[in-house]
Image (cartoon, grey):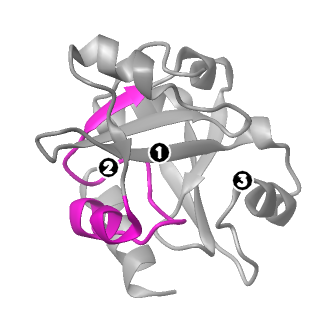
Amino acid sequence: MNYYEEKIKKYIEDNKIKAEHFSFKTSCHSVEEAAKTINASASDLVKNICLIDKAGNLIVAIVKGEDRVSTKRIGIILGIDPPRPAQPQEILEKTGYLCGGVPSFGYQATFFIDPKVLEKEMVYSGGGSDRSLIKISSQELVKANQGKVVRIRK
């Protein structure tokens, strides 16, 4: 287990979040790789899409594994120009995690969760590294990141 996995596990414990952390020998960097690793479908996973607004603020858009984020919708919701995708270095700086393993909580950001995520009782999210995942109920996910549930998918 690496530093980033230990960091999110400690956050889960310290904040009494009801979630399970799993480490794997295979890559979970993409939705396809993660689904194959846990023998599940893309709909069992969530993606944490890191975006940056013009002021440099981090916005995390959480959608089901098979969905895509609409930056236009997020811009409309916030009353700003559509945010841009964060670069890998910005993701590390703003979340404290490497691209491909970013969890759905545990750092400062504005979180948006697409309502389709809540259709699943349990979901898998990034676990801190590209070889780990967190299993969490969709309701606990909302609680853990205080996200706003609003349609953000294309």
- Residue 109: in magenta span: yes
Query: Which residue: 23% across, 17% down?
Result: 78
CA distance separating discs 2 and 1: 25 Å
- Sequence-first disc among 3 and 1: 3
Mark 3 is surrounded, within 10 Å at the Cα level, by few (under 14), some (14 to 19) or many (20 or more) other residues, namely: many
- Sequence-first disc among 2 and 1: 2
Residue type, mark 1 in image:
Ile
Which mark, by number, is residue 16?
2
Q: Which residues are magenta?
A: 87-112
Query: Which residue: 32% across, 12% down?
Result: 76
Q: Position of residue 51 (x, y in %)?
A: 35, 44
Which residue is label 3 attached to?
A: 31
Residue situated in front as seen by the camera: 110 or 125: 110
Query: Which residue: 44% across, 33% down?
Result: 140
Q: Is residue 127 above or below residue 42?
A: below
Judged left or right of residue 126, residue 10 is: left
- Sequence-first disc among 2 and 3: 2
